[in-house]
Image: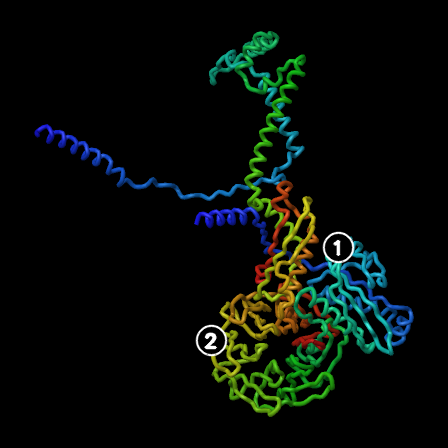
Amino acid sequence: MKKIFVLLFIWIFQTNALALIEVDITRGNLNPLPIAVSPLSIDNESKKSFEKILDKKDIGSEISKVIENNLKTSGLFNPLDKDAFLQAPEIANLKPRFEDWNLIKAQALITGKVKYVDDKLRVEFRLWDILAGKEMMALAFTTVPNNWRRVGHIITDKVYERLTGEKGYFDTRIIYVAEEGPKTKRIKKLAIMDQDGANNKFLTLGNELVLTPRFNSTNQMVTYLSYFRNLPRVYLLDIETGIQEVVGDFPGMTFAPRFSPDGKKIIMSFAKDGNSDIYTMDLENRIVEKITNHPSIDTSPSYSPDGKYICFNSDRSGYQQIYVMKSDGSNVKRISFGKGLYGTPVWSPRGDLIAFTKLHKGKFYIGVMRTDGSGERLLTENYYQEAPSWSPNGRVLIFYRETKTDDKGKGFSAKLWSIDLTGYNERLVDTPTDASDPSWSSLLTN
Amino acid sequence: MNRSILVSSVLHLILIMITAFSLPFLSKKPIDLPPIVSVELIQITDKTNIPFAPKAKKTIEKIKEKEKKLVSEQAPPKKVKKIKPDSVPMPDDKVDKIEKIKEDKQNPEKIDNEVKQVSEFEKKELFDPNNIAALIDKSKVESAETINKSDKVTQDQQKNIDNVGLSLSEEDALKAQIFGCWSIPLGLPYNENLLVRIKLQLNPDGTIQQSEILDHARMNKPGQGFYKVLAESALRAIKLCQPLRVPTTGYERWKELQLNFDAREMLEG
C-alpha cells in the first residue's frame, strides 16, 4: 500500500515537472495571402507557333495574367508585382531559389511551362510553399490552343483549392440579361460570359423580353422566362448546342423558374385564378405538381442542395417573408423575422446559408442567414439591388444593382456586382452593356 | 461526609461555571471571512518596463534643479520670521532678511547645524570635493549589495517559475506575434474540428529547431482534406514568425512548446 502511494506521488510529481507548455492560438488574420505568379516559361518555337494561332506574343505570360487576375479578384490572395521577381521563369520552374522569393515576402509561388505539342497546348504548373521550401502540387493539361483562358481558370481553381481548402469557382460562366436602350423601352437579351467577364456572347436577339435565366447545377443547361405574345413562357436552353425548347405553355403567369439539384425538375411559381403558388414540373414526363396551397402569394422557390427542402418567399404573415418547407410542401416554417421585407431567397450550394434581398426603410440589402433563420448578416446596402446568385463553392454572391434616374430621366444604369461572404470584397463585374438577373454556373470541369 | 459533599459541590460548581463560559464559544458564528480574491503573479518582462523618455528626463531634471534652487534659497525654518498674512511687509524688512541669509551661508558652522533640518536636496549639493574617492568606494559597495540582492530575488523567482507555464505577459506577447503571422484559410468548413496541435522544439533565440504536427494521421483520413490545408497554414505562420517572442530567461521551461491553432472562432465569426 505504502509503495503504491510513493509511486503515485512520484508519478504526479514527474508529470507536473514535464508538463508541456501549451499556447492556444484562436485568432489569425484574414489578410490576403501574398503569392507570386511567375510567368509560365515557353520556348521560342512554341512561342512562334502560338503567335500564329492565337495572335498572342507570349501565351505563357497571358495565362499567368489570367491566374493573377483571378486570385486578386477572389480577395483571398495578394499577387505580388512581377517587377520584384528575382528569378527568371524558366529557372524558377525547375527549382525555385526559396530565399529569393522569401525576400519579396511571397508565401506561395506558381511556376509553369507552356509547350506546343501536336497542334495542342500543353501546360505544366507547380505550386510551391516558399516558407516550407517544398512543392505542394504539380499538374499538366493538354487542350486545344483556343482554350488557353480556361487553362488559366483551371490552374487557379486547383491553387485555390490547395491553399484555402474549398473548391474554386473560376472555371465557370455567368448567364445574365443584357439590357440596352431607355428605361421605358428596354431591349433585353440573354448573354453569357466567363466569370471574369471575358468571352461575352449574346444568346438571343432581343426581339422578346427575357427574364430570370438560371443554370442547371449539373450541366450547362439554362432555364429562363421569355414573353411570347405578351405571355411568359418557360424555356430550356442547352448552352453547348444552342438548342432551345419551350417547357410548357401555362394558362397563367409563371415566374422565377429554377432547376432542382439533380436537374430533373423545374420549380417555379405560377399564378392561377389570382393566386400564386409553387409548382414543380418533371422534365421527363412533364407532370406538374402543386407544392404549396395557400391563398397568399408564394414565389421565388429554391431547393436545398440535397433536394430535401425548398425555401421561398410568401406574404402569408401579412408581409413578404422567407419560409422553408420540405420538398413535398409539408412542414412550412417561417425563418425570417427581422424588420423589413424579404425576397429572392437562394439556398447556398454548401447548404449552410440562404442568401436573400431585403427591403427596409427604402434601402435594398443583400444578405445571408442560416437555414433556420439565425445569424442574419447584411453584406451590402444600396438604392436598388436584388437577385443574388451563389458561386458554385458558396463563397461569393453575384447580384445586380441599379442606379437612380435623375430628374431629366437620365443616369439610370444596371450593373452586375459580386461580393464575398466577408462583405468586404465587393467588385463590379464588367459587362459591355447594362446587365441584370445574373446566374452562376457550376464548375465546367470537376 | 459533609466535607465530601462540600468538595463535590464546589467541584461541580466549578465544572458548571467552566461549561457556562466555554459553551458560548462553541455557539459563536465562524469568522466572517471576506470573499477570496484569486491573485495571479505576473512576471513583468523587460518589454513592460516603459523606457525612460529623454524628453521626460530633461523635464524632470529641470524640475529637480528648480526645486533644489528653491530649497537652497530657502531660509532655515527656525530663522524665518512668522509674518501675519494680513500684514504688509515693508521694503526695508525684506532687504534685511536677504542680507541675513547671505550672512548665514557664509558661515560654515551655522550651515552644518541647519542642514540637518532641511531636505535631502540640499544635502546632495553639499559634498566635500576632497572626499570623492571615499564616496565612490561607498557607492560601489552599495551597488554590489543591491545587485546581490536583486540576483537573489531573480534566482528565487526562477525556482518558482521553472515548473509553471509562461507568464501572462509572455504568453500574450507570443500570441500577439503569431496572430499577425497566421493567415487563416477562409474556405475551411467551420462546422468541423479545426484544431491543429503543433509541438515545437525551440532554440534559445526563439528560432525553430523542429516542428511536429501532433495529429499527423488525420491528414490522410477521408473527408479530412481541409485539415492538411489548416496544418500547413499553421506551419507557415510559425515559420513566418520566427524567431518567436519567447522569454529571455528560463529556456528549460519553454524549449518545448505546444501551439494549439484553432480556426473555428474566427471562421464562425
- Chain containing the residue with disc 2: A
The colour scheme of the drawn protein is rainbow
Q: Is residue A23 above or below residue A197?
A: above
Determine which residue is flagged by label 1: A105
Q: CA distance from mark 1 to mark 2?
A: 56 Å
Q: Residue at image x 58%, y 11%?
A: B98
Decide which of B91, A223 is in the foreground and name it.
A223
Whichever of labels 1 and 2 marks the residue nearer the N terminus, that label is 1
Going by the numbered disc 1, the residue's amino acid type is Lys
Q: Where is residue B97? Give x, y as percent.
A: 56, 10
Q: Is disc 1 in the same subunit as disc 2? A: yes
* Location of residue A345 by image quarter: bottom right
Q: Is residue A59 above or below residue B70?
A: below
Determine which residue is flagged by label 2: A317
Q: Where is residue A409? Give x, y as percent.
A: 67, 72
Decide which of B259, A150 is in the foreground and name it.
B259
The answer to whether any part of residue A419 appears in the image is no
Q: Where is residue A141? Give x, y as percent.
A: 79, 74
Mark 2: give few (<14), some (14-19) or many (20+) Cα within 10 Å: few
Using residue A357 as the reference point, say whether residue A239 is left or right of it.
right
Q: Is residue B143 above or below residue A211?
A: above
* Location of residue A304 by image quarter: bottom right
Using residue B90 as the reference point, say whether residue A207 is left or right of it.
right
Going by the numbered disc 2, the residue's amino acid type is Ser
Using residue A79 as the reference point, say whether residue B168 is left or right of it.
left
Decide which of A35, A367 is in the foreground and name it.
A35
* Location of residue B36 by image quarter: top left
Q: Is residue A382 above or below residue B97?
A: below
- Chain containing the residue with disc 1: A
